Image (cartoon, grey):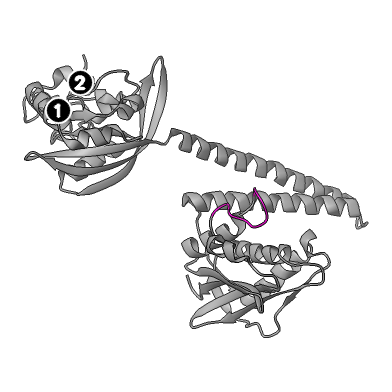
Amino acid sequence: MRYADRAGYPRGGSSVNAGVVPFLPAQRTSITKIGRQAQIFASSPAAGVLNRLPLGVAVCNDTRQIIYSNEKFRELASLDCPNKDVLGQRLGEALSCLGANIEIGGCGTSETCRSCGVARSMGKLLAGADTVQGECSLARHGGKRLETLDFRLWAWGLPYNGEMFHAIILTDTRAEKRLSLIERIFYHDILNIVSGMQGICEIMREEEEGARNAELDLLLFATERINDLIVSQRDFTQAEHGDYEVTVSKLGTLSLLNDIVAFMRRETSARGKTLVVAKDSSDAFFATDRKLLARILVNMQKNALEASGPGDTITAGCDLDDGHVRFWVHNPGVVPEEARAQIFRRAFSTKGTGRGLGTYGMKLFAEKYLGGEVGFASDDDAGTTFFVRLPLEI
């Protein structure tokens, strides 16, 4: 039996199994009233606008039953049918959620529904919230197999013709979720492989009994760099998704700066150039995420090296500024005028295609996770200085 056929259940929830306390009210609006509400809304200007949106949209009445849906919603529900075929159903019922069949009251009335993003969002709207955002993952039968439907939703109250309706926009996030899962599996597996390679190199070095083996040292260095690159990319991905977890530790400014400069002197881009630490740099302790800050400083120095020519000197320094610590990197080059407004935009680069994550990553890490700011100054006389300014304590 389809839920649309049961739309005439008596108000007050008398159709619910005895002893069951529904999460949301089980009562439904009559088929006659549903039809009237659908006609009223279909004639409104909003219906024409919502039908053209590239996202799934459903409009529900005060008993959470659909009185309007656009084509994209029916595509998301895998329903090749006109709007009238979903009238009177609730969202979980139209989307074929397996949990919608647990109780006779339907979608939103079972204990399982208490953790459902749709039911929780509808509950907030019925309680008087103006706008609600949420996520939902539901299991359903897609054809002959079980599948999961993941989506993000936005819902808000929509008064019209003296009645209160609720508009719900759904965005299919299945591709996004699959990509995230693949990324996590990839980073986990590839880091395990590289870790194993490092372990083998260490064992081989111990078996050399103190003898110097340049080829083995080079192999170990290469595996360490591969590991660093993979970890950096993983952290970048997590940061963009908002999933990075900050780890705060006490650091010394000069100690960190000297370590980064020593590391960057081994870069290919540093050949024929001089990379130094400013003599008047401040030495102080502060608290931040060392891994994120190290990545910012590496990117700053890497950009400075790539923007410089043979014989140039790149200077890195740090100073204290009104309760903040400021790291900076100077090179004699100049950022083109037309590039300055876009320098921190994702995938923008003056060095060609496939670049542009370095400066974007610096700003992302510093401002979203470390509570600081990133900026630069560039002119023909003074050259270019990039800086990151961070609080002494996060």
Point out the stretch of residues depicted in magenta: 346-354
Q: Residue at x 62, y 56 (%)?
A: 349
Asked whether 303 or 102 is in front, the reply is 303
Q: Residues within 10 Å of mark 2 (few under 14, many from 20)?
A: some
**Closest to the observer: 206 or 13?**
13
Foreground pick, 163 / 371 = 163
Work out whether residue 116 can be spotted: no
Where is residue 63 shown, x and y percent of the image? 13, 33
Q: Is residue 136 above or below residue 239?
A: above
Is 17 a magenta residue?
no
Look at the numbered disc 1 and give the secondary structure of its residue.
helix
Q: Is residue 187 left or right of residue 110?
A: right
Task: State the mark number for residue 332.
Answer: none
Residue 351 covered by magenta stretch: yes
Q: Earlier in the sequence, mark 2 or mark 1?
A: 1
Q: Which mark is residue 38?
A: 1
Q: Is residue 95 left or right of residue 344?
A: left
Q: Residue at coordinates 58% horizontally, 62% vertically from top-left?
A: 338
**Amino acid found under the numbered disc labelled 1:** Ala
Q: Check the image and report above or below for 199 versus 256.
A: above
Q: Residue at x 54, y 53 (%)?
A: 346
Determine which residue is flagged by label 2. Answer: 84
Q: Please give the name of the residue rendered at 74% of the width and 65% of the height, measured from the top-left corner.
A: 263
Residue type for callout 2: Lys
